[in-house]
Amino acid sequence: MSNTVPWALSLSQSLTHTQTAVEAIATVAFALSGVIEGARKRLDAVGICVVAGLAAFGGGTVRDILLDRRPLFWVQHAGWLWALLVLCVGAMLFLRARHLAPTERAMQWPDALGLGLFSAVGTQIAIDAHMPALVAVLLGVVTAVFGGVLRDVVCNEIPRAFSDHRPYAVCAFAGGWVMVAAQAGGLPQWASLLAAAGTASALRVAAVLMDWRLPAWQADDAAPPDG
């Protein structure tokens, strides 16, 4: 009988403390963006927890399904579910006690941090799974973007990743290629993760602050003449 261990099991066992820490921070950041968006939409406590969970775990879940990686990362680290519930309750109590009005702009900062961190760790996990460079980068984008997409869909919004016109997925894409280049150049894993995450997050923050815009579809106001 072969003693070969499935690569998915080897991958889950080989996750470094750095990867786990980065994924944990990214999860908290996206969860906060979900709490703020849920509060902005005046959802109840259950709704806010669901939206925060989708934002925090949605992208990583899609990545793990595409990689056929089991158990899912939030199942493997079930303590994060308790941390999510504590974070949601604490954030709701804080917002109510301070009478802070959640705004769309306030959501953008934890969202930018989570975008960078998730794009880095998602790309790294795909590289560890021996995916081609382009596939690894795209899986990093999926990890970084799809949590926010699910968050916005549940909150009855066109996902900002598709409609904001300021670079979002493009920032994650750039961060993923920084990760690939850093790994190819022999940088330590922690340095590669920080470089990739910092690049993606910094680009998103710059896009928000400087109002960088991607080309938008220009539709003619007038309908074309018949005939």
Image (spheres, helix red, strand yellow):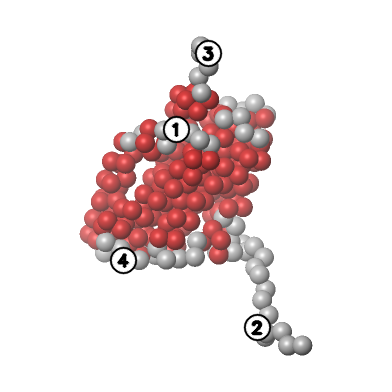
Q: Please, which residue is most extreme toward the bottom here?
A: 226
Residue nearer the viewer, 173 or 25: 173
Residue drawn at 51 percent across, 23 percent down: 6
Earlier in the chain: of badge 2 and badge 4, it is 4
Camera-near label (4 vs 1) is 1
Select label 2 or label 4 by which is in front: 2
Instruction: Check disc 1 and report the residue beneath it.
Output: 70
The answer for how far apart the CA atoms under marks 2 and 3 are is 66 Å
Residue farthest front in this picture: 1
Which badge, 1 or 3, comes first in the chain's sequence? 3
| Kind of residue at disc 1 | Arg
Which residue lies at the image location 52% right of the left edge and 51% below the top edge? 145
Circle 4 residue: 42
Q: Position of residue 131 (x, y in %)?
A: 62, 33
- Residue, disc 2: 221
User: To which quarter of the image does residue 126 belong?
Assistant: top right
Amino acid type, mark 4: Arg
Residue underneath mark 3: 2
Give the residue at x 40% y 60%: 154
Outermost residue toward the right in this view? 227
